[in-house]
Amino acid sequence: MATLILNGKSAQLSAVREAVFACRDAGLALEVWVTWEAGDAARLAEWAGQAGVDRVIAAGGDGTVNEVTSGLMRLPRQRRPALGILPLGSANDLATALGLPLEVDAALRVALQEAARPIDVPHLDGRHFLNMATGGFGAEVTSSTPKSLKRLLGGGAYSLIGALKAWQYQPYPGRLRWAGGERQASLFVLAMGNGTRSGGGQRLTPEARIDDGLLDVLVLRDFRSLHDMWRMRQELQVRPAEGAFVEAFRTPWLSFEGERSLPLTLDGEPCQRQGFRVEVDAGALDLVVPADCPLLASGSAGQPRAAAAS
Ligand SMILES: Nc1ncnc2c1ncn2[C@@H]1O[C@H](COP(=O)(O)OP(=O)(O)OP(=O)(O)O)[C@@H](O)[C@H]1O
């Protein structure tokens, strides 16, 4: 049995209703539970697991996928249902990177019928995310971008607001520690990717894999001039392990002690921390992915779990 946890914002979409009925007509067992406010998706996911459901489908944007993941992670590993995704948001960064269809009917069929594979679930001081955590400038942008504008412009809102704000930003100095080193850094942007894209299509950690037990980290340091910015953009083409403005590395954990509060986003949801530690819970969740999913390090040779019973 599978349960669709549908963000109430999309409850009246006729495409969702038609896709659900079409799947039922095809003999697939599917219940639909609808959220009313923040926190519902996590609670419903936890209840679904407690009720013995073996597949939970998060129907909404990246925020809904994040909430459902948090609910599933409250359950013991052996009772944790597999997670499917029906992308209904404006960004759908994780679904796009996974290679999932974005059309409702096709996406629901994949979520119900494809096999699930074990993936990593990172957490920042206990708060889970599946796709990416960002800190610094990009996170400021996300938390101050009005939701309606974000939806109206899709991914474009980030670059638009980003360009407008770039001239007023202040860097975030602090101490970074990770499995391979330790450094004082004045941060412009910090990205910690389990997936590759965030902010509506920005490929901040393009080499990240969702099942390698590691975070792909991108550090962009403070820059003072247009010339520095130009050098940063050049370094971004190469992504050096230790450049003047860009550092890129992989690690199973990372911590930051800031001199002031750092704005963060976890799968797009804003928060603030002066200090934090991120760790990866390797292979903690079974995620339904397409057979040729580009985010898997294990490729198609890994051992998939069975598709949901019809
Ligand atoms: N019935 C509802 N009506 C309006 N908002 C809701 C409802 N149920 C849950 N929510 C809110 O929706 C949020 C998640 O929305 P969504 O999944 O679209 O994420 P998003 O990050 O805004 O997605 P995207 O950026 O891809 O559009 C939750 O944080 C919750 O506050």
Image: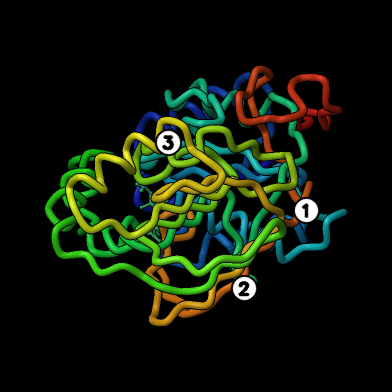
Q: Earlier in the sequence, mark 3 or mark 1?
A: 1
Q: Looking at the image, how many numbered discs can be counted on the residues?
A: 3
Q: Give the SS element for disc 3.
A: loop
Residue 137 - label = none
Which residue has dot 2 on it?
125
Q: Give the SS element for disc 1.
A: loop
Q: Position of residue 264 (x, y in %)?
A: 42, 65
Q: Is mark 2 within 8 Å of ligand 1?
A: no
Residue 203 - label = 3
Q: Amino acid at mark 1?
A: Arg
Which residue has dot 1 on it?
80
Q: Which quarter of the image is occupied by the C terminus?
A: top right
Decide: marks 3, 2 in contact (CB < 8 A)? no
Q: Quadrant of residue 113?
A: top right
Which is nearer the eye, 28 or 134? 134
Q: Residues within 10 Å of mark 3 (few under 14, many from 20)?
A: some
Left of 119 or right of it: where is 169? left
Q: Is residue 200 above or below residue 132?
A: above
Q: Give the SS element for disc 2.
A: loop
CA gap, disc 3 and disc 2:
25 Å
Q: Quadrant of residue 180?
A: bottom right
Q: Amino acid at mark 3?
A: Arg
Q: Position of residue 294 (x, y in %)?
A: 60, 24
Q: Amino acid at mark 2?
A: Asp
| Residue at 26% over, 58% down | 141
CA gap, disc 2 and disc 1:
21 Å
Q: Which quarter of the image is occupied by the N terminus?
A: top right
Q: Earlier in the sequence, mark 2 or mark 1?
A: 1
Q: Nearer the viewer, mark 3 or mark 1?
A: 3
| Residue at 50% over, 69% down | 184
Q: Earlier in the sequence, mark 3 or mark 2?
A: 2
